[in-house]
Image: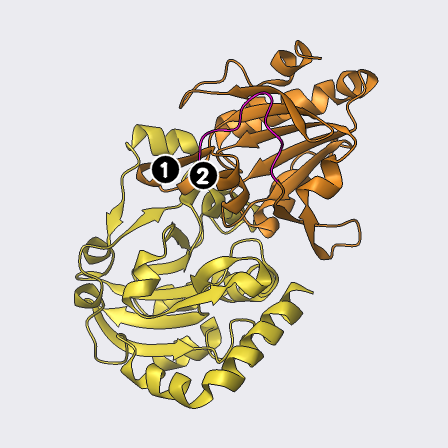
Chain colours: A yellow, B orange
Amino acid sequence: MATNILRRAASSVMRETLLTGMLRRSYASVAVGSDIVSAAPGVSLQKARSWDEGVSSKFSTTSVKDIFKGKKVVIFGLPGAYTGVCSQQHVPSYTKNIEKFKAKGIDSVICVAVNDPFVMNAWAEKLQAKDVIEFYGDFDGSFHKSLELGKDLSAALLGPRSERWSAYVVDGKVKAFNVEGAPSDFKVSGAEVILEQI
Amino acid sequence: MAPIAVGDVLPDGTLACFDAEDKLQQVSVHSLAAGKKVIIFGVPGAFTPTCSLKHVPGYIEKAGELKSKGVDEIICISVNDPFVMKAWAKTYPENKDVKFLADGSAKYTHALGLELDLSEKGLGTRSRRFALLVEDLKVKAANVEAAGEFSVSSADDILKAL
């Protein structure tokens, strides 16, 4: 239902911008070898939290630098909390493979979406994933915009969101990077693919 | 836009929700409110505490009493997408009467003049907390909270206007 809307929206956009889309992908500000911290200077994410946690932490944010510097991070982004593929396939693919990521020395497995941190928190709890992987909100889309991974999903009534993507980042340097052709696809951004790339 | 006030005509706008068959629908506010007595209450955010623990439950509990006083529709709106609104509504399995509608782009909240910037809480542009009593598209009561407050927009408060 919603995935059909996404597919239709994505395919009409693809039809119009097929060539330019491919060109744009090659100029996207993040690719293997790029530095994710310098691609998103001054950008912060908000760790998924309850309101009380927000109050006691004074609604603190975490800078992209603190998330990536000196760490081995696997991060994946998805269009929206509580939506179909995100809930039923994308997050579970990472939570059920968490031991494999740990065995490869990954410090953090992070899920990020253009949602507020309170929605991310409630969703993480619903998926019983809150204690398994980390969830961050990119509430104003600034992180995804900096990486040129923002996507207008107004046709699916989601507004400005993001592509579906995954990356393996070591000390801020992108070692592997995968983006789906359409946000409703789930072919290259899952855990199994990136595990092979680590 | 100046905040909506008593005597104003309720502006039309489009809100989103999932219907009983779980299909995404866009709903016109006028189609819900024309010729009827409706209560529209707005909350800053799904899954945030005052909204979840006090504001919404108050309307669910008092729905019967509100309906006995001639209220046809009780509508909760928030600047969230319809997927989030649906998930939030599901956390109230006892609810039969309150409709949860999504103003994902904040367009309708803006038309009501009730938007609020909550970026420093990680929420972005949201709605003020408010409750409106509207009869055949004429605003009869407009109770808008000051930021952080919860003293004029509850179900008990709006019952006083009926």
Any part of residue B55 in sight = yes
Magenta stretch: includes residue B6: yes
Mark 1: secondary structure: strand
In contact (CB < 8 Å): disc 1 and disc 2? yes
> Vertically, is B130 above or below A154?
above
Give me the residue at 27% from left, 70% from top. A169
Discs 1 and 2 lie in a common subunit: yes
User: In the rendered view of the protein, which quadrant contains the C terminus of chain A?
Assistant: bottom left
What is the CA distance from the residue labelled 1 to the residue labelled 2? 6 Å
Q: Which residue is mark 2?
A: B126
Q: Which residues are magenta?
A: B1-11
Query: In the displayed structure, would residue A182 be above or below residue A106?
Result: below
> Which residue does the image show at 59% across and 37% down from the upper left?
B77
Question: Which residue lies at the image location 45% right of the left edge and 39% below the top edge?
Answer: B126
Other-residue count near label 1 (Cα within 10 Å), few / some / many at <14 / 14–19 / ≥20: some
Letter of the chain that mark 1 sits on in the rendering: B
Given the image, what chain letter belongs to the residue carrying mark 2?
A: B
> Percent x, y for residue A6?
59, 69
Badge 2 element: strand
The answer to whether any part of residue A106 appears in the image is: no
Q: Which residue is mark 1?
A: B117
Mainly helix, strand or loop, the magenta region?
Answer: loop
Q: Is residue B102 left or right of residue A167?
A: right
Residue at the farthest top position: B160
The spot of residue B39 in percent (x, y) is 68, 26
Q: How many marks?
A: 2
**Amino acid type at mark 1:** Asp
Is A188 magenta? The answer is: no
Please, what is the three-letter code of the amino acid marked with disc 2? Answer: Arg
Q: Residue A86's quadrant in the figure? A: bottom right
Where is residue B16 drawn, in percent x and y? 64, 49
